[in-house]
C-alpha cells in the first residue's frame, strides 16, 4: 500500500518575529528531536459585538500550521497484556487498530498540568486558553504494516490546519494533525487527528434523536464503568479529569457523569468487523457516559463496513467506517 498523501487545508499565517525551540522527549526523558519554529506573537485584542476576542486567535494560531514534533517509543509486551486485560480480550500477536494510542505519552510534572488534567496549554499545540473544553472529535487511521511487541517506533506529528469557527454553542477552534508512525519496516500507521476546542457556555450535552434502525451484522452492548475509564486513562497516559473525576466533570464541565473516551469507542468499533483492516475512520457525535449502556453495531457497506455506537436513548455517540485488507 502506498503511503497516503493528505490534502490538507490551512489558514494564512500572521506576521511574526522571534524563534522558539521545541524539544520532544521520549519516555526515558531523553530528547529525540529539537525543531525550531517561529514563535506566535502576542494576540491582538479585537472584540466582536459581545466583547469576545473572536478573531485574535484566528490571526495568531495560523503560525502553528506546519509545525512538527517527533517522539520515539517502544511497544512493550506489558502494554499489550494490560490493554487486553482492560478490554477483556485475548492478548494479540500484533498491535490491533487503536491500540497504538497507548504510545508516545506526554507526562508533565504537576506544575505543568492545566486545571483539566491535561498538560498546560502551549508548546506544540496552539494555546487555546479561552476555550476550556477540549475534545477528540474524530480522525482516520491507515494501517500499512503490522507492529509487534518489541518494535521501536517513531511518530512524526504535523499541525495541518487551525480553523476558528462559529457554531451553535459559540466559538470553536478546530485543530487538524497528521501523524506518521514508523517501525522497523518503514511507515506503519498514518493518522489524521481532529481536535476541537469549545467554550463552557451552553449545555455540555443536549438530548439526541434516536437513530434509524439498521440490520447490523455485528451487535453488542457494553457497560462502561469508572474502573474501565480509569484503567484506560492510565494505559493511554490521559490525565483529562472528565474520565475519572466525577466532581470535576459535573461541577466544572457540566456533564452528567464520567465521559467515555472517544478513542476507546473507536477501538471497540474497529474490532467489530472481526477482520484485519487497512483503514478506519471515526467521528464523535455526542458524549457517552459511564454507567449507561453503550450499544455497538457494524454492518457491511459494499466492500467495507460502517459502525456506530448508541446511547440508551438510541442516539448516535460515534460513527465510523472501515475498509478490510485486500
Image: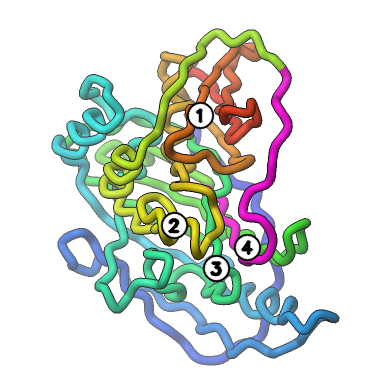
Q: To which residue does mark 4 refer? A: 198
Q: CA distance from mark 4 to mark 3?
A: 7 Å
Residue under label 1: 279
* Residues at marks 4 and 3 touching, judged by CB atoms closer than 8 Å: no
Residue nearer the viewer, 167 or 254: 254
Query: Please, what secondary structure does the residue beneath circle 2 have?
Result: strand
The answer to whether residue 117 is left or right of residue 210 is: left
Q: Is residue 247 left or right of residue 184?
A: right
Q: Earlier in the sequence, mark 1 or mark 3?
A: 3
- Kindly report the distance in space between the C-alpha atoms of the residues bearing marks 1 and 3: 32 Å
Q: Residues within 10 Å of mark 4 (few under 14, many from 20)?
A: many
Q: Which mark is residue 132?
A: 3
Question: Closer to us: mark 3 or mark 2?
Answer: 3
Q: Which mark is residue 157?
A: 2
Say which residue appears at 43% left-offset and 39% top-offset: 290
Residue plotted at (85% across, 81% down): 49
Q: CA distance from mark 3 to mark 2?
A: 23 Å
**207 to 135, vertically: above or below:** above
Q: Secondary structure at mark 3?
A: loop
Amino acid at each position: 500500500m502506498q503511503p497516503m498523501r493528505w490534502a490538507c487545508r490551512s489558514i494564512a499565517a500572521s506576521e511574526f518575529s522571534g524563534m522558539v525551540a521545541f524539544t520532544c522527549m521520549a519516555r526515558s526523558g531523553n530528547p529525540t528531536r529539537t525543531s525550531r519554529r517561529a514563535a506566535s506573537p502576542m494576540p491582538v485584542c479585537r472584540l466582536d459585538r459581545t466583547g469576545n476576542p473572536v478573531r485574535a486567535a484566528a490571526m495568531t494560531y495560523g503560525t502553528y500550521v506546519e509545525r512538527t514534533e517527533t517522539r520515539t517509543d517502544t511497544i512493550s509486551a506489558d502494554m499489550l497484556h494490560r490493554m487486553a486485560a482492560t478490554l477483556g480480550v485475548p492478548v494479540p500477536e500484533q498491535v490491533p487498530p487503536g491500540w497504538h494510542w497507548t504510545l508516545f505519552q506526554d507526562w508533565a510534572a504537576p506544575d505543568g498540568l492545566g486545571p483539566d488534567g491535561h498538560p498546560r496549554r502551549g508548546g506544540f499545540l496552539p494555546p487555546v486558553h479561552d476555550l476550556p473544553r477540549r475534545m477528540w472529535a474524530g480522525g482516520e487511521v491507515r494501517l500499512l504494516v503490522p507492529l509487534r511487541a518489541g518494535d521501536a517506533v517513531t511518530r512524526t506529528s504535523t499541525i495541518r490546519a487551525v480553523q476558528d469557527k462559529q457554531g451553535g454553542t459559540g466559538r470553536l477552534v478546530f485543530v487538524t494533525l497528521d501523524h506518521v508512525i514508523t517501525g522497523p519496516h518503514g511507515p506503519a500507521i498514518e493518522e489524521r487527528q481532529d481536535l476541537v476546542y469549545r467554550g463552557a457556555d451552553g449545555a455540555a450535552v443536549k438530548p439526541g434523536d434516536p437513530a434509524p434502525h439498521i440490520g447490523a451484522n455485528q451487535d453488542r452492548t457494553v457497560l462502561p464503568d469508572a474502573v474501565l475509564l480509569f484503567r484506560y486513562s492510565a494505559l493511554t497516559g490521559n490525565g483529562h479529569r472528565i474520565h475519572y473525576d466525577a466532581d470535576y466533570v459535573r461541577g466544572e464541565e457540566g456533564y452528567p457523569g464520567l465521559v467515555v473516551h472517544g478513542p476507546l469507542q473507536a477501538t471497540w468499533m474497529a474490532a467489530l468487523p472481526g477482520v484485519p483492516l487497512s483503514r478506519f475512520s471515526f467521528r464523535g457525535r455526542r458524549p457517552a457516559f459511564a454507567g449507561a449502556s453503550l450499544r455497538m453495531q457494524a454492518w457491511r457497506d459494499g466492500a467495507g463496513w460502517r459502525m456506530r455506537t448508541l446511547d440508551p436513548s438510541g442516539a448516535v455517540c460515534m460513527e465510523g467506517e472501515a475498509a478490510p485488507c485486500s
